[in-house]
Image (tube, rainbow, N blue to C red):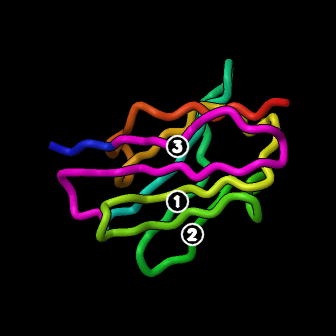
Amino acid sequence: QVQVVESGGGLVQPGGSLRLACTTSGINMAFWSMYWYRQPPGKEREFVASITSGRDPVYLESVRGRFTISRDSAKSTVYLQLDSLKPEDTAVYLCRAGRSPGYWGQGTQVTVSS
């Protein structure tokens, strides 16, 4: 059984940082493409970043240079470092293991507010 669990969200002031983690079980994550998405309040879910072995990470244009995706396969965990956060980054951040439809976690809330 595949499980995907996100953590690390919280309330942060504009300009601040957070590191989100997505831990998986039931798969060998080293061989899987991993994705971060987000769903702002009242809006559609949108792609944020992805990481695939042997390829450069891919980012949503509005987060490029501020967010960094990485993975630690030994820990079966993929990370999303969020820097220079803006209020418009407020959303539930979700992790997906594998290409669509893949396996989704429940999400972690990130709120950027002063």
Instruction: Measure how far apart labels 3 and 1 are at the Cα level.
Output: 18 Å
**Mark 1, secondary structure of its residue:** strand
Residue visible at 39% across and 68% down in the picture? 72
User: For mark 2, does the 10 Å Cα neighbourhood hold few (<14), some (14 to 19), or many (20 or more) residues?
Assistant: some
Residue 38 found in image quarter: top right
Q: Which residue is mark 1?
A: 50
The answer to whether residue 63 is left or right of residue 56 is right
Q: Nearer the viewer, mark 3 or mark 1?
A: 3
Residue 69 found in image quarter: bottom right
Label 3 close to label 2 by CB (< 8 Å): no
Please tell me whether residue 18 belongs to the stretch shown in magenta: yes
Q: Residue 35's spot in the image, x, y percent? A: 48, 53
Q: Residue 47's spot in the image, x, y percent? A: 59, 46
**Mark 3, secondary structure of its residue:** loop
The answer to whether residue 82 is left or right of residue 106 is right
Report the disc number at residue 8. 3
Report the disc number at residue 57. 2
Report the disc number at residue 74. none
Point out the stretch of residues depicted in magenta: 5-29
Label 2 close to label 1 by CB (< 8 Å): yes
Count the marks: how many?
Answer: 3
| Most distant residue in the bottom direction | 54
Q: Nearer the viewer, mark 3 or mark 2?
A: 3
Q: Is residue 114 above or below residue 14?
A: above
Q: Nearer the viewer, residue 53 or 11?
A: 11
Residue visible at 23% across and 51% down in the picture? 25
